[in-house]
Amino acid sequence: MKVTLRQLRYLEALASEAHFGRAAERCAVSQPALSTQIRDLEAALTVTLVERTPSGARLTRVGEEVVARARRILAEVGDLEAFARARGAALAGPLRLGVIPSIAPYLLPKLLPRAAEHFPDLQLEIRETVTATLVDELSSGDLDLVVASVPLDHAAFAELPLFDDAFVLAAPRRGPFALADVSTAADIPADALLLLEDGHCLRDQTLAVCGAIDARRLRSSGVTSLTTILQLVAAGQGLTLLPDLFLATVPFDTENIRLTRFDGVEPRRTVGLAWRRSNPLGEEFQRFGNLVRACAPG
């Protein structure tokens, strides 16, 4: 029995999701089919790769090493496919594009029509998830290109900064938080700050620009949407920082929300592209980056 690329892809998905059901959903197959392929892979390698648990799956020590090697193999296969596509004059065929949630809903409505116009033979496959997952999937070859806040600080990636996305203070017009004295991002009280839940890089960026904030006073949050954060502000529940990219595309309640820009150098994040350095489509990705740059706020 020989090892197949399908088995390696299924194992990589299982390693990322730590759950057979979620891994099967990610691979668009049934759970029994994925489980069978994993068992066949274990039989081919004559080792146990996965420990089945009541709550999901956990890699064995050997399994972790096999996954690391599998990711390198899958990335090389992806680059081989990209090399073949690069023989043409422009981007064409499938392109797996990952975008973080605090960018995707506000960038894609502008970007997708531009991409269709400039690269009519391109078939974009969009993946929206948090930065850590995008980094893993780009590294393993599951994605070709990522739009995120840069730098990602990954030695295997090439990055292209595209535009700065400034943060604006959103405060309620009524209630106790309307009176907060905030002239810089560092002045925002920890107990007034509304944030996305853990795992979203925008949360980390917001905390970074707020300076030495007392994390013990932060409110716990299960919010995953900037739109929900904005509604909480309108209801007088607190303050937040919102990126220009969001504000340029989403209507907000001016009767209940006051937006304020900071004086001097505004706090901001940098939006950019990232791809594997080994991918031969780097020059074409830079052309694609020009389309993304044209979608910048203002």
Image (spheres, rainbow, N blue to C red):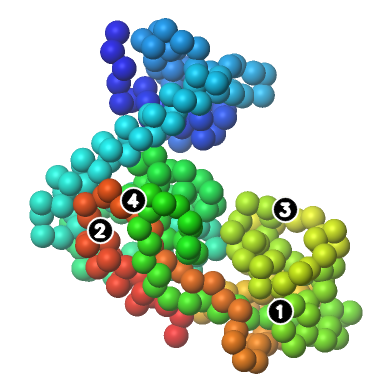
Q: Is mark 3 on a helix, strand or loop?
A: loop
Q: Are marks 3 and 1 in contact (CB under 8 Å)?
A: no
Task: Tell me what residue is drawn at x 32 percent, y 32 percent.
Answer: 73
Quarter of the rendering occupied by the C terminus: bottom left
Q: Mark 1 points at which residue?
A: 185
Q: Mark 3 points at which residue?
A: 222
Work out whether 177 lies above or below 226.
below
Q: Is residue 157 left or right of residue 194?
A: left
The label on residue 282 is 2
Task: Tell me what residue is drawn at x 53 percent, y 58 percent.
Answer: 101
Q: Is mark 1 on a helix, strand or loop?
A: helix
Q: Residues within 10 Å of mark 3 (few under 14, many from 20)?
A: few
Q: In this view, does 127 lie to the left or right of 202?
A: left
Choose mark 3 or mark 1, whichever is in front.
1
The kind of residue on which mark 4 rests is Arg
Residue 237 in view: no
Q: Residues within 10 Å of mark 2 (few under 14, many from 20)?
A: some
Task: Tell me what residue is drawn at x 39 percent, y 39 percent.
Answer: 140
Q: Mark 4 points at which residue?
A: 276
